Amino acid sequence: MRKLNEQYHIQDQILKERLDQVLGEVMEECGIECWLFACREYNEDPIFRCITPALYPTARRLTILVFARKDGKTECLNLGMPDPFLNQYYKQAYSPKEEEQFAAVERVLREINPKNIAINVSKDGYAYTDGLSHALYEELMEKLPKDLTDRFVSSDLVGIRLLETRTPTELEVYPEVMDVAMEIIEAAFSDEVIIPGKTTCREVMDFMAQEVNNRGITTWFNPTIDLQNENGMQEEDAVINRGDLVHCDFGIIYLNLCTDTQRLCYILKEDEEDMPEELKQAMKRNNRFQDIVRSNMKIGATGNEVFVKSVEEGKKEGLRPFLYTHPCGLFGHSAGPTIGLWTNQNPIPVKGDLKLYNHTSYALELSILEYLDMYKRDTYIFTEETVVLTEEGVSFLAENRDRIKVIRGGK
């Protein structure tokens, strides 16, 4: 793990790249000339941490930022309280001692004179582009003249594109973030932690949560541990026994990036030297479905196109596939195209119609259902790998995606 000041430095380097390299491109691409961002202290917009430096953790009273795009150039303006950290990235365009804040907003917007002004009110139900509070929206509508508020448009597209695009430094450090997550999974799936006949799923979950806390980072959802055997799937207080297939779902936040990983381990029976061959073959079929999905995740394809084509190809090969891949980056369930849902194995209107873009990241989340003689029942083979999509295709951030960890249970 990097020292805290080094983490801050990396996060701020990423912010500079996002503002200098990504923001202008996505505003141009989405046809947005001005983006008005406003939120109050302790009620921060979801996009807040994506566009502010590491040492500016909350809004200051009322933070108002304006992004303007004109003649191929992007200007980033602060119309809130002056702040030494924020003003390294934003030009101060408002003096609290000389001007009322909304008067400054009107002045700046008239100087820019954009044809449209994006605000964070989602028209398609995206949580991360719907962060403008109702009270602030009403205040904008009341205090700004109608000829400006008539130019308000939803920030859906520009917000999604800004959030989903990974900067060069993010692509460079993402494998490092993944390494931390994998260290914790490896530690949890071990003879030291799992003692057959004694350890419960809840105890393994608690171990993982404590390991995260010990590193000074956080999870974006509570670690999940469950098991499958001849009695089906069990969770929480279930005791892990020999012959069980144990499954984890785990995601951390480090350097402002989320991971999302599902791995499996098998607890050997007393007379076994290795896991049953049919379990190895089931994992190979799961990996085959992963590869089918990867091959269809092409830049320019929609999430629904990837979903339909992948499931059809999987079924043609005799698989019983389930596909629910999602963007993963600054949020665990992040901005970008939906590629199936666990609860809805069909094309998803609107959110599934978004396209895949270069330099984006995903949780390649899926499963297949296999009948296993060892359990005498259908069994889910769950996997999830954090991946990035570039012009070279989909690449994994961690190794051993084809591996089911074996625990001998010597204690």
Image (cartoon, helix red, strand yellow):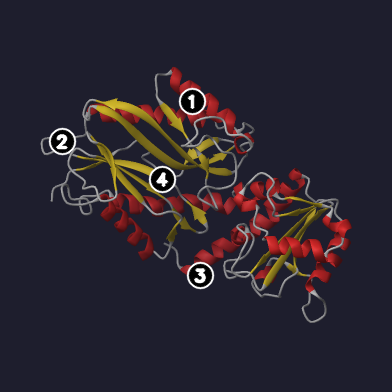
State left or right for residue 186 relative to residue 91: left
Q: CA distance from mark 2 to mark 3?
A: 47 Å
Do the numbered discs 3 and 4 sit on residues whose CB atoms are within 8 Å? no
Residue 219 can be seen in this image: yes
Q: Residues within 10 Å of mark 1 (few under 14, many from 20)?
A: many
The answer to which of 316 and 190 lies nearer the viewer is 316
Element under disc 4: strand
Percent coordinates x, y for residue 120 in the rendering:
69, 55
- Three-letter amino acid code of the residue under disc 4: Thr
Q: Nearer the viewer, mark 4 or mark 2?
A: 4
Mark 2 or mark 1: which comes first in sequence? Answer: 2
Percent coordinates x, y for residue 194 in the rendering:
22, 50
Disc marking residue 5 = 3
Disc marking residue 244 = none
The answer to which of 396 and 309 lies nearer the viewer is 309
Disc marking residue 311 = 1
Q: CA distance from mark 3 to mark 4?
A: 27 Å
Q: CA distance from mark 2 to mark 1?
A: 35 Å
Mark 3 or mark 4: which comes first in sequence? Answer: 3
Mark 2 or mark 3: which comes first in sequence? Answer: 3
Q: CA distance from mark 1 to mark 3?
A: 45 Å
The residue tagged 4 is: 261
Residue at 75 percent across and 62 percent down: it is 138
Mark 1 or mark 3: which comes first in sequence? Answer: 3
